[in-house]
């Protein structure tokens, strides 16, 4: 049994691991590649393999197409793991918002946020890239009146020492360098919707969305930012262009204020964050790849970087990195399938990014490679990977996916290709198996993961979800009808709450 803390005084998660007998299987395992040892040129061939450490806007970032151990051996992490170097706030706002439409409560919310970010200690404020629209001017004037010294960011120069800066502001201007403030130590107020993912404060928001968020609700009345504000209020007096906060937030984020939004795709009303904050040293958006088999796996990040390898592959962005397994004899076999464990970050992918599997059913025969499955973003606004049918959404936790091989294959060759374009766009694959029939499944291991959302806490779990107000034996009760992901509203998170996933 192991425990995992969530939010102190709010909820704790308890993970209970119970074994279960694997089902009977009549499958035949024909081939396995687990990447636990180096097989390049022996068990598989690669195109564009390597690791290079880059300096991106003053920060060291790895770009790679290699076994994960080659990355971790350099002291780097496969995944996006960036603690907040200073306090962070991500806000629904817009550089060009007219001052006249902002309510007094909206202005107080913004003032309180600045006080929290800076510890109410006036000093130098850097506005990036520069004060431009009416909203920026209003914010600058209020900061100046409160004793702050406001200056435009010279994006062509290095940032000054973080200790000399009280606050940085990422405005709605799209020309801001994407990761300029990701690891910068000064506090950050972020309302650049297109760049939230690169500074890891939230998923990408909608830029200049013209709407009225209506009644705003304070979601965390105990937070200092909420001081002096009513429980509900209007933020603007009419529909206006606003840069929204993304719905994907770091687990460490605290949602201070929310609004209701009718999703035009589903027609459903959603509770969305108007303001969320992250404490210094708390994890930002992302996570470490986990759940892989054995000692390592194959991974790729920032795959359009031409200096990753010196083998002549992939000097152009449209050339994908490749890994091709040696042929596997499947002649005469029926119900041949390919099963592979896949993972990917869900922060910043675009439609041009992909992780795809191709097959050549007869090796050097007349048939060439054809695509078996392609993982990419379902829409331009979705930043996660799913397969062609919109299923099997990927995350940093590895999961098995399985696809049938067309009948008649003889010498089966499997190739995996990937293309990504930034340091936080990372893919991974592991434990490639070619087999017939259904594989025997390992004993199911319950899992549980918490994500902070505007409406409360979301639990992603496998197994049976249980809840208790104590840790005493016999106090656990199944949450009837709970399906993953399971939302626990803020109103239910009062006092001590414990959750665990148990094997069926």
Image (spheres, grey):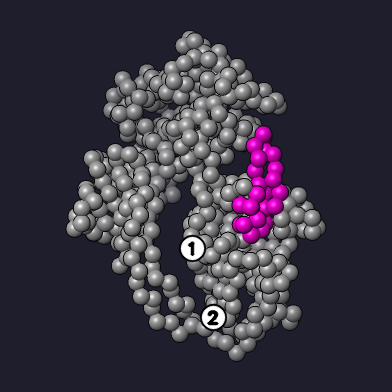
Q: Is residue 439 magenta?
A: no
Point out residue 75 in the picture as x, y percentages from the top left corner. Answer: 62, 47
Q: Residue at x 69, y 75 (%)?
A: 326
| Vertical relation: 367 (above or below) 90 | below
Neighbourhood count class around disc 2 (C-alpha, 10 Å): few under 14, some 14–19, many 20 upward:
some
Residue that lies at the very extreme toward the bottom in this rendered image = 332
| Vertical relation: 443 (above or below) 362 | above
Q: For residue 46, which quarter of the picture?
A: bottom right
Q: Which residue is mark 1?
A: 399
Which residues make up the magenta segment? 51-74
Query: Could you tell me which quadrant the C terminus lies in?
Result: bottom left
Q: Main secondary structure of the magenta part?
A: strand
Q: Residue at x 47, y 77 (%)?
A: 439
Report, in whole angstroms, how far the alpha carbon at label 1 lies from the one at label 2.
Answer: 19 Å
Q: Residue at x 44, y 34 (%)?
A: 278
Please tell me which residue lies in front, 279 or 169.
279
């Amino acid at each position: 049994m192991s425990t995992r803390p969530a939010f102190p005084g709010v909820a704790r998660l308890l993970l209970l691991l119970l074994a279960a007998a694997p089902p009977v299987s009549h499958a035949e395992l024909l081939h396995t590649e687990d990447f636990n040892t180096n097989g390049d040129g022996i068990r598989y061939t690669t195109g564009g393999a390597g690791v290079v450490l880059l300096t991106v806007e003053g920060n060291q970032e790895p770009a790679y197409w290699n076994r994960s151990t080659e990355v971790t051996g350099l002291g780097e992490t496969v995944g996006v793991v960036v603690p907040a170097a200073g306090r962070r706030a991500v806000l629904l706002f817009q550089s060009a918002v007219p001052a006249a439409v902002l309510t007094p409560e909206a202005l107080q919310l913004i003032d309180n946020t600045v006080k929290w970010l800076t510890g109410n200690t006036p000093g130098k404020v850097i506005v990036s890239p520069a004060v431009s629209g009416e909203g920026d001017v209003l914010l600058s004037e209020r900061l100046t009146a409160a004793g702050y010294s406001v200056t435009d960011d010279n994006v062509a120069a290095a940032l000054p020492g973080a200790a000399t800066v009280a606050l940085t502001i990422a405005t709605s201007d799209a020309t801001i360098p994407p990761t300029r403030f990701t690891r910068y130590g000064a506090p950050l107020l972020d309302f650049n919707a297109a760049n939230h993912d690169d500074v890891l404060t939230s998923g990408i928001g909608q830029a200049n969305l013209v709407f009225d968020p209506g009644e705003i609700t304070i979601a965390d009345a105990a937070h200092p930012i909420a001081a002096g504000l009513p429980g509900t209020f209007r933020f603007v007096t009419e529909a206006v262009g606003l840069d929204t906060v993304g719905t994907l937030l770091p687990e460490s984020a605290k949602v201070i204020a929310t609004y209701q939004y009718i999703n035009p795709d589903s027609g459903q009303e959603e509770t969305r964050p108007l303001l969320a904050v992250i404490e210094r040293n708390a994890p930002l958006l992302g996570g470490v790849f986990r759940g892989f088999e054995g000692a390592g796996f194959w991974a790729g990040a920032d795959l359009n970087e031409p200096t990753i390898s010196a083998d002549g592959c992939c000097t152009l962005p449209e050339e994908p990195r490749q890994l091709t397994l040696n042929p596997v004899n499947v002649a005469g076999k029926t119900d041949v399938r390919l099963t592979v464990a896949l993972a990917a970050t869900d922060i910043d992918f675009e439609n041009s990014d992909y992780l795809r599997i191709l097959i050549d059913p007869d090796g050097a025969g007349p048939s060439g490679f054809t695509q078996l499955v392609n993982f990419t973003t379902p829409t331009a606004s979705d930043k996660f990977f799913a397969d062609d049918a919109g299923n099997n959404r990927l995350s940093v936790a590895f999961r098995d996916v399985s696809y049938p091989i067309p009948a008649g294959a003889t010498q089966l060759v499997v190739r995996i290709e990937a293309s990504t374009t930034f340091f936080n766009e990372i893919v991974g694959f592991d434990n490639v198996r070619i087999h017939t029939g259904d594989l025997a499944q390992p004993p199911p291991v319950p899992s549980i993961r918490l994500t902070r959302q505007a409406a409360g806490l979301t639990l992603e779990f496998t197994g049976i979800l249980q809840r208790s107000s104590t840790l005493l034996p016999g106090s656990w009760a199944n949450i009837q009808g709970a399906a993953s992901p399971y939302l626990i509203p803020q109103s239910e998170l009062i006092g001590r709450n414990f959750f665990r996933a148990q094997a069926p």
